[in-house]
Each structure stands twice: as C-alpha cells, then as structure tokens.
Amino acid sequence: MTALHVISAGAAKGLVLTLADRFEVSHGTTVRGTFGAVGAMREALLGGAPCDVVVLTQALLAALGAEGEVVTDTICTLGEVATGVAVRAGDAVPDIHDAPALCEALSHATSIHIPDPARATAGIHFTKVLHSLNLYDAVATHLRPHANGAAAMAALAESSDERPIGCTQVSEILYTPGVRLVAPLPSRFALVTRYDAAVASRASDASLAEAFLASLAGEATRSLRAAGGFLEGIHANRVA
C-alpha cells in the first residue's frame, strides 16, 4: 500500500488525523503524519524527511515556496487559529477576560503547560505575554514547556497538580481529550495564526497529495475545520 507523508504544524494535527481515516479508505493509501512546532517541522522538511503535503503558517509556506520546497500554486488556506487558555476538564474555569484577570489566573496556577517557547508559535507568543504582564519571573518555576502544543495539552490533562493551566493554539485544545477551552487570550494579547497547506515539491505522487489537500481545505470540510478551531476572518493581531 502506498503512503502519503504529511509534515504538519501541531495546530493541524487533529484535523489531519480526523480526515486521514476517511482518506485512507477512499484512496487506498496510508497517511503518515509528522507533527510538531512549526520551526521543528520546517527543519524536518529541509532535512529531507519524506513529505508529500506540508501544513505550516502562511509565512513559512510562502518562504518554502520561494525556496522551491513546495509547489507554490498548490498553496491553500485552512483557516485562522486563535491562541487560547485551557484547564483540565472538570476544573473551575478562571476569568481571563482582561490583563488583570489573566494575570490573576496565571499567578494562581501551580503549573503552566505551554509548547516550545523557542520554536512553537503559541509558546513564543505566550512567553512575550508573560513579560508584558511583568509576570515571567514570578511564574518561571511553574512553567512546563513541551515539544508542541498537543504534548502540552496531553500533559495538562494528566496533571496531578492542584491548579494546572495551559496555553496553546485553540485547535490543539479542542482536539485533546481531558482539557477544556477557557477562552482565547484577551484582546490585548490576542494572537491569530493563519495555517496553509501545499504539495511538497518532492511529493512521490502529486495527484494523491493534491487530493488530500482538497480534503483538508475543501468546502465539504469547512464545518469540520470550524469545529476544530480553524476559522475565517478573525479580527485580532495576526501572525502569518
């Protein structure tokens, strides 16, 4: 059986895996995904990992197109994903509607689970938020960085701490059992990331890769993308 290799930002892991099952049945192939922080996924692609489809931020895919790593005219948009706050399912939901409330919620937490603060979009941004709140030094010992947002949310779900909390892309929160979305970050700290997908220039079967893109970004799956946190036209600070 042929295999379709997908290198993807962790924010799209739930969407890719949800669509992979039906795609495998309809196309007689196996979908093999590699997921993680966008910086790490770019490195994997440039390092020569097998790849047919790439899912990353708009800016990274545009750059990869300029470098000849993806087929530029296949780039399509999946949607925009907000960065949000999560707690364990069943825990009390803190108020984070503004800066003072967010500061109080984070100060009260006994652990704070985040994706890679050096290579993950949400991790980089959240670190900036902590500095903006003048809170970084106070909560530094409570930070629990993980390789990506999915790992951060899985750790949050399993945490035995008294008051754990987490921050990552909303899509990763919605697709992780055992956690619940509190809300996107308050407007002052809001971050929305646009994710695109494209066929890799070294795709072994370009027509199969294009078919998977159509499944990911097509009209038929718009409601599935929306339910998973990929929205259209969010008005907030945006990172391409």
Image: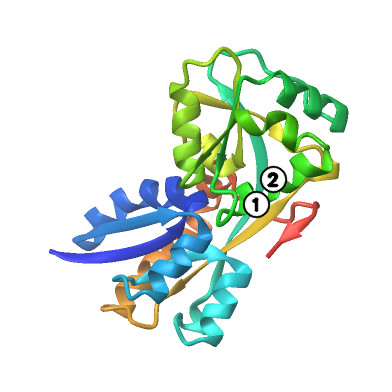
Please, is residue 189 above or below residue 213 in the view? above
Query: Between marks 2 and 1, how big is the CA–CA gap?
Result: 5 Å
Q: Position of residue 128 (x, y in %)?
A: 74, 48
Q: How many marks?
A: 2
In the figure, is residue 95 to the left or right of 30?
right
In front here: 108 or 71? 108
Amino acid type, residue under disc 2 in the picture: Thr
Question: In this view, which residue lies farthest toward the left?
Answer: 1
Q: Position of residue 187 (x, y in %)?
A: 83, 42
Mark 1 secondary-structure assignment: helix
Q: Which mark is residue 58?
A: none
Residue type of the residue flagged with mark 1: Ile
Which residue corresponds to the image point at 69% horizontal and 45% vertical from the top-left?
Answer: 127
Asked if disc 2 and disc 1 are in contact, CB closer than 8 Å, the reply is yes
Indicate the colouring scheme: rainbow
Left or right: residue 18 versus residue 112 is left
Q: Does residue 218 appear in this view?
A: no
Q: Quadrant of the C terminus?
A: bottom right
Residue at position x 30%, y 72% in the image:
208
What residue sits 61% from the left and 19% below the top? Answer: 110
Secondary structure under tag 2 reads helix
Residue 223 locus on image (x, y percent): 55, 46
Res. 127 mark? 2
Q: Which residue is mark 1?
A: 124
